[in-house]
């Protein structure tokens, strides 16, 4: 089997409401789709959104990396998964989302070649349900409380609450939601918006609340601040933007700078990179979150297969993009039941 042709194009799905964090405001999910075709008639897909604030990539740079650097190295070569994955990972620096799109398509081809769904190719025996957190976008405390209440009443009991408003009201945002929804599990995500002093002030202000975790409170490069916050916090600290690959995970855990690691296929270059981070975290006895950017159905599907294959390694799942779409596409390869997915 060889890769005989490829196709790259864009797609977009409107969101029901704007998605707002400390880093950006987004009104639709736009992503690059990749098709790989083989000489024996097989076809597989990958996709990647542009998240410049995190990975440095634009839609144009993803397309350029695919067309000029990655895909020409794959066409016509014998299909040997690990060899092709190594080619993708090493053919150019950075461009982790472009690499992720190719990586997931290669894994899907390998699974098809074995006559298996991807989760079984990765080692799982059955497709167990996957429950995701659902995001509450950054807004005024009252608006966020109302939105969180609306989500909880719809059965979404794991809420990832965006903070980092720069207005001194972040503790109020969380306290209002926690008081209104004592049975909800609250994950707080600052998206690098605070400094050390602001992080510690938030922890002190919310120390009496049953928060599940705090995610990436300070800039990714400030491991010393992250270490001090982790040592001080009564809540587990989750490293997100500080960890792109397995070496980053090792560095963060060696420094005692986080209790958990957030794995996103777009940061680590796909399933191969995710598996490498899982291996590192296993040696440290550290669990992970499986997260995502605002993504299309193809890449969310790849992440769901990974979640099903490694349920014991992921303490949290944050793959809520489809729940934020204005309308679910009719041809999804998974079903949606509240905040629960089934492949």
Image (cartoon, rainbow, N blue to C red):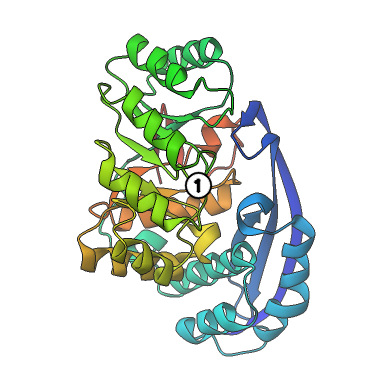
Is 80 drawn above or below residue 131 in the view shown? below
- Percent of width and height locating residue 245: 45, 67
**In the picture, which quadrant includes the N terminus?**
bottom right
- Percent of width and height locating residue 242: 47, 57
- For the point 57% across and 52% down, which residue is it? 298
Question: In which quarter of the view is residue 32 placed?
Answer: bottom right
- Percent of width and height locating residue 52: 68, 53
- For the point 28% across and 50% down, which residue is it? 259
- For the point 64% across and 83% down, which residue is it? 74
Is 179 drawn above or below residue 185 in the view shown? above
- For the point 46% across and 34% down, which residue is it? 198
Left or right, residue 90 beside residue 110? right
As rendered, which of 238 and 37 lies closer to the eye?
238
Q: Residue furthest front?
A: 197
Left or right, residue 300 beside residue 199? right
Left or right, residue 181 beside residue 164? left
- Percent of width and height locating residue 181: 34, 13
Q: Which residue is mark 1?
A: 333
Question: In which quarter of the view is residue 46 placed?
Answer: bottom right
Determine whether the residue tagged by mark 1 lies in a helix, strand or loop.
loop
As rendered, which of 299 and 160 lies closer to the eye?
160
């Amino acid at each position: 089997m060889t890769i005989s042709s490829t196709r790259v194009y864009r797609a977009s799905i409107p969101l029901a409401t704007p998605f707002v964090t400390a880093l950006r405001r987004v009104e639709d999910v736009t992503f690059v789709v990749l098709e790989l075709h083989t000489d024996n008639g097989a076809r597989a897909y990958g996709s990647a959104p542009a998240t410049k604030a995190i990975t440095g990539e634009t839609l144009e740079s993803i397309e350029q990396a695919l067309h000029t650097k990655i895909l020409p190295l794959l066409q016509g070569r014998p299909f040997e998964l690990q060899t092709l994955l190594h080619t993708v990972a090493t053919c150019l620096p950075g461009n982790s989302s472009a690499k992720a799109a190719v990586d997931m398509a290669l894994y899907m081809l390998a699974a098809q070649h074995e006559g298996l769904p991807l989760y079984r190719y990765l080692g799982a025996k059955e497709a167990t349900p996957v429950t995701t957190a659902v995001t509450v976008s950054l807004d005024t405390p009252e608006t966020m409380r109302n939105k969180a209440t609306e989500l909880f009443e719809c059965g979404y009991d794991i809420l990832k609450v965006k903070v980092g408003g720069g207005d001194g009201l972040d503790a109020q945002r969380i306290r209002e939601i926690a008081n209104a929804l004592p049975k909800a599990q609250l994950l707080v995500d600052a998206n690098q918006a605070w400094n050390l002093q602001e992080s510690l002030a938030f922890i002190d202000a919310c120390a009496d609340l049953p928060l599940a975790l705090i995610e990436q409170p300070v800039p990714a490069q400030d491991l010393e601040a992250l270490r001090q916050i982790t040592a001080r916090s009564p809540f587990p600290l989750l490293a997100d933007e500080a960890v792109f690959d397995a070496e980053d995970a090792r560095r963060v855990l060696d420094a005692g700078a986080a209790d958990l690691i957030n794995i996103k296929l777009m940061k680590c270059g796909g399933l191969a990179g995710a598996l490498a981070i899982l291996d590192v975290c296993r040696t440290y006895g550290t669990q992970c979150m499986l997260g995502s950017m605002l993504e299309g159905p193809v890449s969310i599907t790849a992440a769901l297969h990974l979640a099903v294959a490694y349920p014991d390694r992921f303490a949290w799942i944050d793959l809520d993009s489809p729940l934020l779409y204005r309308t679910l596409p009719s041809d999804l390869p998974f079903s949606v039941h509240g905040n629960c997915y089934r492949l």
